[in-house]
Image (tube, rainbow, N blue to C red):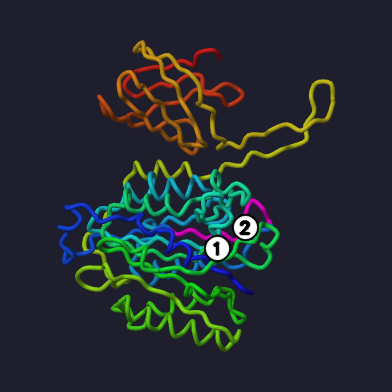
Amino acid sequence: MKKLFLTSIIFLSFQGLLPALSQDSDNFDSSTPVTDKWALLVGISKFDRPSLNLKYAAKDAGDFKDFLINKCHFAADHILSLENERATRDNIMESLGDTWLPRVAIESDLVVIYFSSHGSPSDMDVAGINYLVAHDTNPDKLFTTGISIQNLAETIKQRVRAKRVLIILDACHSGGASASKGLIRTANVDAAQIAQGTGHAVICSSAKSESSWESKNYKNGVFTHTLIESFQTNGSDTKLSEAFNKLKTGVQSQVAAERGVSQTPVLEASKWKGDELVLAINPASPRPVPQEVLNSLKALESEPISLENGSNNNSTNKATISRSPNAIPDISGDFLGSNGLKYTYWQKERKCGWNMPQFGVKGDCNISPDGKTLYSSWTGFISGKSTASLECDENGKVIKIIADDGTVLDRLNR
């Protein structure tokens, strides 16, 4: 099947979005050992709109994850993988800019970011902006439901602290997506524009005037399958340039043999300083994932809410909502604390928080998987952390928050 990758568009769209790094970044010693290694992998084959579905995008991400763990010395818990239903727009951006990479990676680490999904051409947007398509993206409302390339680039620059970042973009669509306004690639693209600044290397699947293809011989895209093989050219000592040379030749030869057309992967790493990237290098000082991060990641888990047939006291059949044992309690609303302060909570699944503008304080919270505990931290005029137990009514609405410091918050207007 033909896969029309939009990585070339994405390279062009990054032009000017990754300005020169700060003086601190310029002074980063490129000979500093890689202390630890982290990854965010996104692969979407099943979309909220079935007309967008792909064949192997999620499998490609899963196979690449196995490769990082088994061959490249990435700890399994150092890789966050968002596939299919978990790869919503909010989850992807949270992982890039909030709950994952900014909270685990430091400047001496190595970070890998991998995307396999659809991308949109600029003529699909009134402002000429390109987007990555998440699981819940509506192609008719890309501005509000997609991930703009500008936003993605700025997030990586501003919030991923690691000075060694490898970005791999497989933004594609299949022929079956033609009903959704034709998510296709455009030309006139300069791949060099994405890799601005020390330590940003980028691999894309094809040159600007080409398409990318899924294999006829195995259940992967030709690009990702060959990428994995190429990074094993010289075992764990394989350098980026060695891997790319094999990748480029391998993809070109296989696509030519199977399809009779050209597909040429593109690498941009001209801004890389110091020794060349070795993906399989052993981390010098690996660290555990912080418990606060583990708590935050639980917000990415979707808890099922099922519809079951039931009957009321009058024996009239109706659809009733049955909450699972791990259903997410409703904490949104106003609470009055025993300290005399009013708190207004917002919520998005397990992630929630509150603001107190009058004191310049902002709180971020996460609800535990069993729905009984709230983990909170706050910054501003004062900073701190706490753990609180939650009391809910029969409908799952939080009516009382009891913090470990003795503060009690009661819901107003129950």
Mark positioned earlier in the residue sequence (2 or 1): 2
Distance of label 2 from label 1 (alpha carbons): 8 Å
**Residue at 62% in and 64% down:** 54
* Dominant SS in magenta: loop
Q: Amino acid at mark 2?
A: Lys
The magenta stretch spans residue 49: yes
Q: Is residue 288 visible?
A: no
Q: Is residue 42 visible?
A: yes
Could you say whether the residue bearing mark 1 is in a helix, strand or loop? helix
- Residue 360's place in the image compared with 371, above or below, is above
- Residue 328 % position (x, y): 54, 34
Q: Which residue is mark 1?
A: 58
Q: Which residue is mark 2?
A: 46
Drawn side of residue 85 relative to residue 199, left or right: right
Could you say whether the residue bearing mark 2 is in a helix, strand or loop? loop
Drawn side of residue 28 relative to residue 38, left or right: left
The magenta stretch spans residue 14: no
Answer with the quarter of the image where residue 235 lies.
bottom left
Q: Quadrant of the C terminus?
A: top right
| Residue 169 or residue 31, whichever sits in front | 169
The magenta region covers 41-50
Q: Residues within 10 Å of mark 1 (few under 14, many from 20)?
A: many
**Residue at 35% in and 22% down:** 357
